[in-house]
Amino acid sequence: MFSNMKIFVSLTILALGYQSASAGSLLETFGSGANAFTMEFVTIGNPGNAADTTGNPNPAGSVAYTYNLGKYEVSRGQIDNANAAGNLGITLQNMSSFGGNGLLKPATGISYYEAARYVNWLNTSTGNTAAYKFDGSGTFQLWSPGDAGYSANNMFRNSQAKYVIASSNEWYKGAYGNLDGTWNDYPTGINFPFTPPTSVTGGTAANTAVYSQNYFAYIGPADITNAGGLSPYGTMGQGGNVGELIETAYDGSNNIAGERIERRGGNWYDGAGALDASTRYYFDPSNENASIGFRVAAVGVPEPSTGLLVVLGLSGLLLKRRKTGTV
């Protein structure tokens, strides 16, 4: 009977839309059949946290809600599967000279608009609302007051969408934030003033990151699951490996279609300065670069504890019945 209870609990968790991954993370599944793939997310809690006033922009990192942030950068394999399933036509940079085109390598050579189309497919293929607006010719547009999900505070993002490109504050909190609301200088949890993580070509050791590599040695980025130590919240590669596109316009306004957006995090050949909380760059949304990828966030979703409370309640009921001999 105990075996039956475990099966019931597992099925209940799946029915709630969550699957167990590593500790503190969640797996979401997209596509189907040969094109099915998963993305792993970590939960960023402490909603309504105070912003960091020592980084860039200033203030930065205050997020009013709990959300899930991609544990890893989006991979080439995830783009390939989405292309096949959704006929997206997204092109990737040929990285043959920089470590190869393995499926677990970060997806680079993708413009902001292509990243937005990919995220839209994540939403629409799972019955959710598209995050970003494109007209009939494929041109990026602002959401307008007549659109359901319009928000005057962010005209790039539809407020009813689940999956999004991580915003400036969402990305910053996941990279530099501690669970107690304090802040670090680097995405691997370093809180000593400007003491960077150890430079490596790959691996998962604590307080390491893939940066300061010789560009002309043609090493390239590591696999997304082998890109250094984790942040306090459990993300990997927000410092080094590849730079990352941010949803937010560089000036923070999100009110002009086509304006320059933010990117940050540094890449495998950048120095330590590109990884710290005071450094960010701007990027033309139509440009593509071999050293830049992106990360997905999931917003407007229940905290894992909500589903687990239901499961625990149901499993407790089963245990009670077993003890009384009714199961």
Image (spheres, helix red, strand yellow):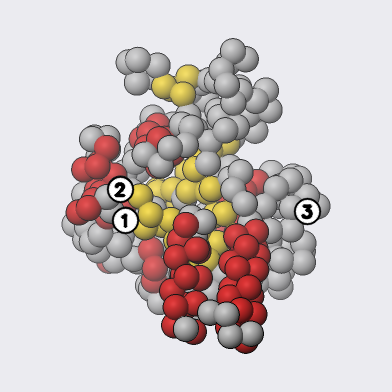
Residue 52 at x, y = what percent?
76, 53
**Residue 104 placement, left or right of 2:** left
Mark 3 vs mark 1, foreground winner is 1
- The answer to whether residue 260 is above or below residue 318 is above
Mark carried by residue 49: 3
Amino acid type assigned to the residue bearing label 2 in the image: Gly
Q: Are marks 2 and 3 in contact (CB under 8 Å)?
A: no
- Which is nearer the eye, 38 or 9? 9
- Disc 1 target residue: 37
- Residue drawn 78% across the image and 50% down it: 48
SS at circle 1: strand
Residue 285 at x, y = what percent?
44, 31
Amino acid type assigned to the residue bearing label 1 in the image: Phe
- Which is nearer the eye, 36 or 312? 312
Label 3: how many Cα within 10 Å (few below 14, some 14–19, many 20+): some
Residue 121 at x, y = what percent?
37, 37
SS at circle 2: loop
- The answer to whether residue 163 is above or below residue 55 is above
- Residue drawn 29% across the image and 44% down it: 82
Mark 2 vs mark 3, foreground winner is 2
Label 1: how many Cα within 10 Å (few below 14, some 14–19, many 20+): some
Seen from this angle, which residue lies furthest front?
326
Among the 4 quarters of the image, the one containing residue 87:
top left
- Disc 2 target residue: 31
First in sequence: mark 2 vs mark 1: 2
Amino acid type assigned to the residue bearing label 3 in the image: Asn
Gap in Å between the C-alphas at discs 2 and 3?
35 Å
Q: Are marks 2 and 1 in contact (CB under 8 Å)?
A: yes
Q: Is residue 33 visible?
A: yes
